[in-house]
Structures are given as C-alpha cells and as structure tokens.
Amino acid sequence: MHWLATKSAVFSIPRWRSLALLLRSPFHKFTTFGASPLLLGKHGERLLSFKAQRVFKGTTKATRKSRQLTYLLEEKDQSHIMWWKERMQMCRKPSSIQLVKRITYSNLLGLDVSLKNGSLKEGTLNWEILQFKARFPREVLLCRVGDFYEAIGFDACVLVEHAGLNPFGGLRSDSVPRAGCPVMNLRQTLDDLTRSGYSVCIVEEVQGPTQARSRKSRFISGHAHPGSPYVFGLAGVEDDVEFPDPMPVVGISRSAKGYCIIFVLETMKTYSEEDGLTEEAIVTKLRTCRYHHLFLHASLRHNTSGTFRWGEFGEGGLLWGECRGRPFEWFDGIPVTHLLCKVRELYGLDQEVSFRNVTVSSENRPRPLHLGTATQIGALPTEGIPSLLKVLFPSNCSGLPVLYVRDLLLNPPTFEIALAIQEICKLMSNVTCSIPEFTCVSAAKLVKLLESKEVNHIEFSRIKHVVDEILQMYRNSELCHILQLLFKPTWLATGLNIEFETLVSECEWISDKIGEVISLDGENDQKMSCSLVIPSDFFEAMESPWKGRVKRIHAVEAFAGVEKAAEDLSIAVKEDFLPIVKRVKATTAPLGGPKGEVLFAREHEAVWFKGKRFTPAVWAGTPGEEQIRQLKPAIDSKGRKVGEEWFTTTKVEVALMRYHEACANAKVRVLELLKGLSSELQAKINILVFASMMLVIAKALVSHVSEGRRRKWTFVTLFEILEPEEKNSGDISNLMEITGLSPYWFDVAQGNAIHNNVEMHSLFLLTGPNGGGKSSLLRSVCAAALLGICGLMVPAVSASIPHFDSIMLHMKSYDSPADGKSSFQIEMSEIRSIISSATSKSLVLVDEICRGTETAKGTCIAGSIIETLEEIGCLGIVSTHLHGIFSLPLNTPNAVYKAMGTEDIEGRPKPTWKLIDGICKESLAFETAQNEGIPEKMIKRAAELYLSLNGKDVSLEKIDAKVEDRSFDFKLKSGEVYDPSSKSAKSPVYSRTKTLNSMERLQMEVESAITDIYQEKLIELYKPMNIFESAGVTCITVAPREQPPPSTIGASSVYVLFRPDKKLYVGQRLPYGTD
C-alpha cells in the first residue's frame, strides 16, 4: 500500500491503482496540464505535501529529512514538472538513463533531497538555483560556479543526453545528478542544446573580490533559444556569433475564412497573421519554417463531423498528420491575444512588453504555393527534384539573399510589387557603374545586439557599411532610381513603411554617429605600448582586448593612464630585473650555469623574472647582487607560489598592479562608449532593419540578374488578368505565351536544352510517350510562370505571362501508410484542394491524372475533372496516358489537344521532347522497360499479349475531323512593362571612394591606352568586314568594397588592378563558352 497525503485527509489506495484515476486528467503527450493540488513523487510512486507538516507513522529516514524543506511547490508548477518528466522519458544514453533514476518529480529541479548534495535549504547553492529556475521553469539552467557552468537535476540529465558531457562524480548513486561544461566551451554547449530544441537560461557570477566565507552574487545574464543565441559579453570581444534564422513561435487556428497562422518573433518583438489559408498552404508554411514552439487553437478540434478526434474523417487530416509527430500545446481564447500571452510566459517577458504587428494585407496577392507545387519544382529541397533555387543564383551566393527569394517564391507578391521587382532587375541588368557589395546583416541580429547593448566594434563597422551603401546608391544617378524602387519589396518583407527622405537622413546620422565613435579600418591613432625590457606579447595581450575599438579622443584620460602605467612598469622592470639579466649573460660557465630572463607569464597576466642558479655563492657587492636580494617568489591570484623559477619584486608588483588597473579602467571606458552608442542607435532600430533588408533584396536581385544573364534567360511581359465583366469581345488578356521555353535545370548557355513554344489560352490535354517530356514540360511551365509573377527572369527566349492568383502543380502521388491512405486517395485529396482553390485566374498543372486506380473508372473521373477545370476557365495542362478520355462525350469546347512528339529513327520511335498539336497514343512502354533492364523474354511476351488484346500497334496520329484542332495563332499585342532608357557609355560614374588627382590621371592614361590597343586590334581583325567602326569600349571604375555591374557578364573584359606599389596588373576575361 502507498500513502497519499493531502492537507485535510489521508487515503489508502492499492499499489497497482492508476494515479490517473485520482488526478482525473489523463496524461497525454500534447496536453497542457491544469493545476492540481497533488504532487507526484519519485517515478510517480511517492506523493509529498510540503504544505502539511505532519509525519505519518512508519515514516522513513528520507521522509524525515524532507521535513527540513521550506520550499512550497505552487500548483502551477506541476504542469512544468510533468513537462520535464516527458523529456526525462526520452533519454536514451546509458549515462543519462542512470541519472534519471535519481530524479524525483517533487520540485522544479528534480532533486531528491535525501541524496548527497540534494539539500534545498535556504542559503544553499541549490536553493539559489531553484529561485532562478522558478522564473524560467522550462529552460535548462546553467549556473556559473568558478571556471564551470553547472547544472543539476533535470538540467544535468539534458546536458549529458544532448551536449555529450559527462556527469560530475561519475555515476555514483548516492549523489544528485550534476553536470557542466568549462567556461571556454559554453558556446558549443549552448549550440548543442538549442539544436535539440531546448532554451537555456545562463546565470553569471558577479566578478570581483568577495568577503571570506561569503557566496558570490549571481544574476541572469541572458538566454539562448533556438534561432536566438546568447550574446552576453560580446561587446568586449572580437568574436562574432553566428546568428541563425530567427525561429518564431507559431500558432494555428481556424476561422470562417479558412485556416489562420500566426508568427511571433520574440527577438524582433513582432507578429504577423495570415488568414483564409488552405490546409495545404498551412502545411507548406510549417515545413518551410523552423519554429521554436507550436501552439494549436481549440478551434481546430471543431470539424464538420462533430467529433472530438481532430482529422478523424479527413478534414484537417493533412495538417494533423504534420503536427502529430511534433510537440505542440493547445490554447484557446482570442488567437492573437492569447498566443502573445503564451509567448510572454514562454520567454519570461513582462506582460507590458508589446509586439508590433507587421502583417501585410494579402488582398490582390497570389495564394501561397501548395506543398506539392513547392517540392515538385525544387523551391523546397526534395530528393530527385532539380532545385529551382540553385539555378537562380551564382554558386557563391548563399544565406539571406537565397532565403529572401525562397520566401518570395513560396508567397508570390502582388502585381504592383512584382512589376517593381522586375524593373529593379532590368535596371541592374543595364547599369554601367560599379555597384556596392551589398552588405547583408541579419535584422534579428541587429535587433538583439542593440537591445542587449552587446554590439562590438566589428558589428558597428558592418552597420556603417550598410548605411553607407544606402547613401552610395542615393548619391549615384544610376543607382538612385533602383533605391527608390526597392522600397516596395522591402515594405512587403518587413512591414515597415518608411519615407525615402527619412531613410536617407537617418542613414546619414547613423553613419556620422558611428564614424565619430568607432575606430574604423585604416585609422591608426592607437598603438600598443612597447618597451625594450618587456616582451611585446605582454602588451599585446593586455591592450588588444580594448584598443582599436573606439577613437582615442573619447578616452584620452584612460589611454594616457595606461601609457603612464606601462612606462612605470618598464622602469621598474628595468631597475629590478635588467641588472640580474646582464649579470647572468656576463657569466660564462659550462652546462648547468646560471640562467635568467624577463618573460611574460601568460596564464597569470604578469611580467616576471624566470631563472635558476643565479644566486652568487659569495656575496661580493658585484653588480646585480642588490637586485637579487630584493627578489621574492612570484605568487598567483590565490596567493599560491607559482613555481621555483619565477620571481618578482615589490616594486614590480606595485607597478604591475597599477598597469592592470589602468587597463581595466580603459576597458571599462571603451565598453561604456560602445554600450552608449548602442543606446543611441536603439531609437533607429526600424531604420536599420529596413536598410539591412533593402540590401539583402538588392543582393538577391543583382545575383539573380547576373546568373540569369549568364544562362541567357529573359524578362517577361507581365499583365493582369481581367475579370469576365471587364473583358471586351475578342479580348485575349488571359493568354500565356512562352517562346523558347527550356527546362530550368538545363543551362542554355551550354547548348544542351530543348526549347518549346507554349501558347495557351485555355486548358491543354497533353499526351505523349514515357520519357517524352510531359512531366518536364509541366515543371518548366510552372517554374516559368512562378518566376514571372514574382518579377524574376525566366528560362525562355521571350514570354508573356498573366499575373495568376495561384499556381498549382500536381505530380505523382505516393501512399501514406501512417495515415491509412492509398496513393489514389492522396491524389484525390490533392485534386479536391486544387479544384476548390482554382479560379479563372489560376494556372493548374496536373501530371498523369487518375493513374492510381482501374482504367475505366479512372478515365471517367479524369474526364469529369477536366470538364470542371474547363468550366472554371483556368489555364492549365492535364497530361494523361488514359486515351479513353478522347472517346468520352466531354463538354470541353475550349480544350486544346497537345502531344509530345516522336520520330522514327532506324525504324524505331524515339521521343523528340517537342510540343506539337494532336494526340500521341504511343507510350513507348516496351522500349522504356527494355532500356531499364527488363529481360528481353519478358518484353517479347508482353508484346504478344498486347497484340492479342489490341490487334495492332498504336502510333502517333493526328486528330481526325471529329476532334477539331483548337490551337490559336495570334500573338499578344501588349508591350513590355518597362523599357529602361539607354545609358551612354561615357556617363559619369560616381564612387564613394575619393582618389588623388595623380590616380585619376593614371586611370585616364590606362583607359586611353587600352582603347587604342583595342581599336588597332579590331582594325587588324575585321578590316575586310568593315564592322570595326561600330565597336566601342566601356570603361568602369571599381573602387574597394565594390563589384562590376551585371552588364559586364557575357562580355569580353580587360581588367587592370592598381597595386599599392604603383604597378599595374592586367588580365583578360573571355565571354562564357569562348575558346
């Protein structure tokens, strides 16, 4: 029997009786536990009440010890204890499993007070840690203790399981679980924990002297969350912290409009809300977003079947399948309000902390891509699918620009913003001046460092680069228009609406403010102290942590104090140590003679004399003897003798102490200046976020244009689709025409792509053999349309694409045993979603429809789907091998029949991968099977069976008179959206780098010489053709931290480097593919 204690009664229950019956709250992995007055004991077997101070008869020694505990467990803490119990049950390493056996679930630390070092008495370290843990009960707590960060109880088990650390004291069973890491390994430990999904609270010690037998004061220095690293102390070091993408807290609910998803970024203190989404769009967003926590609203439980089991009858089944394998919590109430409350509770924020709404209206914006569409064109990494993102950029472009374009493709912009993006790309393609490097800095990194005042001088320099590059674009006549156009896509990405003049003026203020305080590259107003008698690495180690960060003018007194202290130290060393060193060097003796020199004791940050056998056998008043008498053993900071060979003097120690104090004062002053500058820039956070995102977008688009030009892609003519009531008779505004379309994964510049022409005004019914290119055509059309409506370049010779309100691609389906659904069920579910979302402004692409069921009924279902799409009036392609469709009495007056062609080569049909009019009933199934290694005997038998069933071969044939050819032969008459005015090759080029007059003359001379050589070579080579007169030379000046414009790509270029030694380095770059 086990005893259950409450405040007013005692119950006796059988040992086997389930506690769940008493708690009346059945445990579930995803359930948030409510308050309960009962306290779970160790492994759910013992229940202790710290509110009732009575002891029952037969109390054990462990129970008597628990009477000393003064900690009162609050009722709300029980849900946190159960949360930790889940994590303990997930431990798999043998060492962590052994630690879990010593855990008790009676307090937030999981400490068993009956074990050694398990006391929670007030004043103990465990009690102090418990106070911090109570503030952040679901975070791993690392407490600084000397040279280690220690964890106990639950947290120690997590460190051993996920950070690869060993428990303190081995696996002895009489002590509470303890683990930790050295101070130098803190970053690695935090990375391991956050990668495993844990948040970490770091408690630091107050540095400095303390009274004897007194405990050091401690404080919470910061937190590390997945996507939000620990930044405490970064202002005083040169190290940089890699900032991953911020991971939001995600909430999902259901409304009358559809599904709603809410993203909350604690780092940015922002949230956004998207409503009216389909289930597929929600799942796509979950798969493309690495989130910190997931909350599901109670509205998701209310489905049309009226059942409590969410997704039981299909509705919400896709979302449920995505969520049930991940940890989540339920919440209720007003979705946005209550989710923000959850976030404040999760991160330990005050309820007064506000979050800025950065939601951008989705009105007139295309719907987000479905998951199947995104994966089948490689917008999301998918095994076996060519990646669309990889072909949009040069191989050296990665990081924030790529992520921006990925998000742009997954969430296409409005028509107006797409036009702006396209115009930016066109201008960048034709710009003739050098362009900035476009420094990319994470907005989340800027916000966190500025708010925590941990921006170091390196990061300030990067911030200055950001604002300087904005100003460089503003001051350049060619780039200024691009800067203005960047405002629209930047507003879409950040939700910030900033005026052009405001951005420029604030960037000027920020640049000037940083330039006033921070010591920038090339400035040399601070040198390390030096001395002939003190090793230079001593001064380097002592002064490099704070020198060269801020301008000397702001810390003149502190710097002068260091210089004076360094001089005094040099004099003390010279007077006390140098005579001994000279005496040792003057003494000539065989092996085993005296040794002595002045050295830097790096571990102790001191300059001492190190020697042996230098004491004279007979004191005769010779030089150096007086100094030898003054020597005393060197001691460390704890008063212990360092060694037998290290010595110092009182005068040197006093001078050394004063030098350390001066360095400490200078470092404090430098940190004050850095943190003060951070405080001043906090008011400009929105400007910095906007400017940094603007440069990320600029970097993404200029990189895309560079790669697009190399691949010989083109810009589309983009236009809006008119509503039916807005159309005139004979209007063809919904025509999509693509000339020279090539698969996006082929490089046209290498000449290995098949080009097709697509002229579409209604639905295509596409047939063709296996391996004939049907799926490739659908992917190519989908990618081109998506790139076009985003304003990007497309893999074609020319294109005219309407701004679709949605693009949906359905490819092959696979079964889902976990959901109990066959491949045909999955296909029908996706088709249902497509049909329910499609409008007359949509592009629908379906590959090999109804292939997962028996032919007759599958053909009829396919015919019905085609009729439905025809009735909707969308553009699209439906490919099929179900040739029986063409015998059905379909009501599809506007559908056009297309095929992937074949040709006879040596009497055998081969695919041409070209789109033609008509129907192709040749599948090339036998040839495909044979090419894939099916035995010839099986192929022959299959042919015999086919002949017995059909009586003849079916080859490519044209549609007879009963099926009219409904292809159209007219062209779209609308012109280009934007035709940039041509720029003269001799237009002035503005550069932010000022050069000397002599350098300008040298550049002009080099330009003139190259032009003359070029003209002479043209006359020599092309004089018979008489074309040399039209050729010209464009000279572009590229300053430091700039790059050549995209217009130089594909052109033969001569580059001249002006070396510091006033010599020239000349090289040549030939166009791509030139021998």
Image (spheres, grey):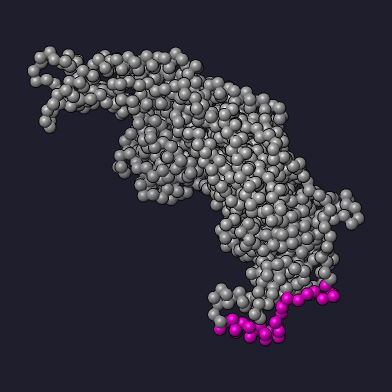
Was residue 590 drawn as part of the magenta stretch in this picture? Answer: no
Q: Is residue 995 above or below residue 583?
A: below
Residue 881 in view = no
Left or right side of 520 for 814:
right
* Image location (x, y in percent) of residue 16: 43, 50
Task: Give the residues in magenta.
Answer: 937-963
Q: Dividing the picture into quarters, in which one does residue 641 lie?
A: top left
Total tally of numbered discs in the picture: 0
Q: Is residue 290 above or below residue 268?
A: below
Picture quarter with the C terminus? bottom right
Residue drawn where x is 77% and y is 50% of the image = 717
Residue drawn where x is 35% and y is 47% of the image = 95
* Image location (x, y in percent) of residue 709: 65, 50
Residue drawn where x is 73% and y is 64% of the image = 878
* Image location (x, y in percent) of residue 497: 70, 32
Left or right side of 941 for 95:
left
Is 1064 in front, or is 473? 1064
Residue 192 in view = yes
Is 249 in front, or is 562? 562
Is 1064 in front, or is 95? 1064
Residue drawn where x is 41% and y is 50% of the image = 92
Farthest left residue in view = 618
Left or right side of 1049 for 134:
left
Is 745 in front, or is 170? 745
Q: Is residue 589 above or below residue 712?
A: above
Q: Is residue 776 above or below residue 1056?
A: below
Was residue 938 drawn as part of the magenta stretch in this picture? Answer: yes
Q: Dividing the picture into quarters, in which one does residue 941 lie?
A: bottom right
* Image location (x, y in percent) of residue 395: 56, 49
